[in-house]
């Protein structure tokens, strides 16, 4: 396992890598959510250490150990993030991969799918297919979403802590590094991402993407998630929904990968085995 960095469009992106991660190596790419960082995926790195899969996690711009954006208005957007991750994977030589996206990371994955950026399959959780624009937003997200610090810039410290408590669901206690990376996140990354996406400025319509994308999508959901609405996920027009159902984690909230890592990793390994043959 190693931690390294690459330069993409003039900014340094930090990554953690395990395994070869070559062009032909089956690789699981992990993409964190709003105000997260690559360190949230340590259970996944541990689980896949002695398997045939390589694992790669990348800090988004403005998050973790990556630089803040040079051009925030274009970088801190779904299309901007998607381009950065695609360029990062190209630079690292990763071609045979599935993308596993949590929350914001999942929506970035859906944007990448809409652009047909090369992934073999996509696993998302906490990421209803919605936007750009306001259509279906109130169906896709529960009321607690709009009362949180999800899209705030100059956020008081206690509100960031409350947001962290909410996004890690039933996890108790929440590890201190998870608070640290949330406080490190550039506030403009939260603000611009939300305002740009809900403003409908540009990007692929995610509801249409899932209805037309031929490759498999695994959709997981923590049934105690205070943000994402299960019914919306179940009724979305998935063209190729893995196992023909949303995979539910009854005792988990927004982050099943840390709340029930054993159960989550079992699903992820099966999905990766099915797709990365």
Image: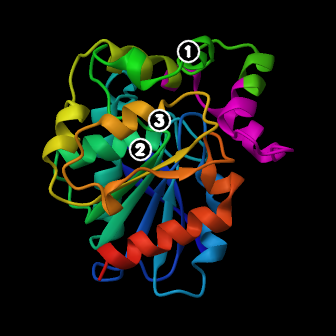
As for residue 18 lying within the magenta part, the answer is no
Q: Secondary structure at mark 2?
A: helix
The stretch drawn in magenta includes residue 184 = yes
Point out residue 41 in the picture as x, y percentages from the top left corner.
Answer: 62, 58
Viewer-closest of 145 and 52: 145
Q: Earlier in the sequence, mark 2 or mark 1?
A: 2
Query: Residue placed farthest to the right in the image?
Result: 173
Q: Which residue is mark 2?
A: 106
Query: Nearer the observer, disc 3 or disc 1?
Result: 3
Placement of 19 over or under 263, stated as above or below: below
Q: Which residue corresponds to the image point at 35% horizontal and 28% vertical from the top-left?
A: 77
Is most of the magenta stretch helix, strand or loop?
Answer: helix
Q: Which residue is mark 3?
A: 230
Report the residue marked by disc 1.
Answer: 143
- Please name the colour scheme applied to the rendered image: rainbow
Q: Give coordinates of residue 231: x percent, y percent.
A: 42, 32
Q: Residue at x 62, y 18 (%)?
A: 149
Which of 8 and 175 lies nearest the eye of the viewer?
175
Q: Give the alpha-carbon distance from disc 3 to disc 1, as whole Å.
A: 13 Å
The earlier-in-sequence mark between 3 and 1 is 1
């Amino acid at each position: 396992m190693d931690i390294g960095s690459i330069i993409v469009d003039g900014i340094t992106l930090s990554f953690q890598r395990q395994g070869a991660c070559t062009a032909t190596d089956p690789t699981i790419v992990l993409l964190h959510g709003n105000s997260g960082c690559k360190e949230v995926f340590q259970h996944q790195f541990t689980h896949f250490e002695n398997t045939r899969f390589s694992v790669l996690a990348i800090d988004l711009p403005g998050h973790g150990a990556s630089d803040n954006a040079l051009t925030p208005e274009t970088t801190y957007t779904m299309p901007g993030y998607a381009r950065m991750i695609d360029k990062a994977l190209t630079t690292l030589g990763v071609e045979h991969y599935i993308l596993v996206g949590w929350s914001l990371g999942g929506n970035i994955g859906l944007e990448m799918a809409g652009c047909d950026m090369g992934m073999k399959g996509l696993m998302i959780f906490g990421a209803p297919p919605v936007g750009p624009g306001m259509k279906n937003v109130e169906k896709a997200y529960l009321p607690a979403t709009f009362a949180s610090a999800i899209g705030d810039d100059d956020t008081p410290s206690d509100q960031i802590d409350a947001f962290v408590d909410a996004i890690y669901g039933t996890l108790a206690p929440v590890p201190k590094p998870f608070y640290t990376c949330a406080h490190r996140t550039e506030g403009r990354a939260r603000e611009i991402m939300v305002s740009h996406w809900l403003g409908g400025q540009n990007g692929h319509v995610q509801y249409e993407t899932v209805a037309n994308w031929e490759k498999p999508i695994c959709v997981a959901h923590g049934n105690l998630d205070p943000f994402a609405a299960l019914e919306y996920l179940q009724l979305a027009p998935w063209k190729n929904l893995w196992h023909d159902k949303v995979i539910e984690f009854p005792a988990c909230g927004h982050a099943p990968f840390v709340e029930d890592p054993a159960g989550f990793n079992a699903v992820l390994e099966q999905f990766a085995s099915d797709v990365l043959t």
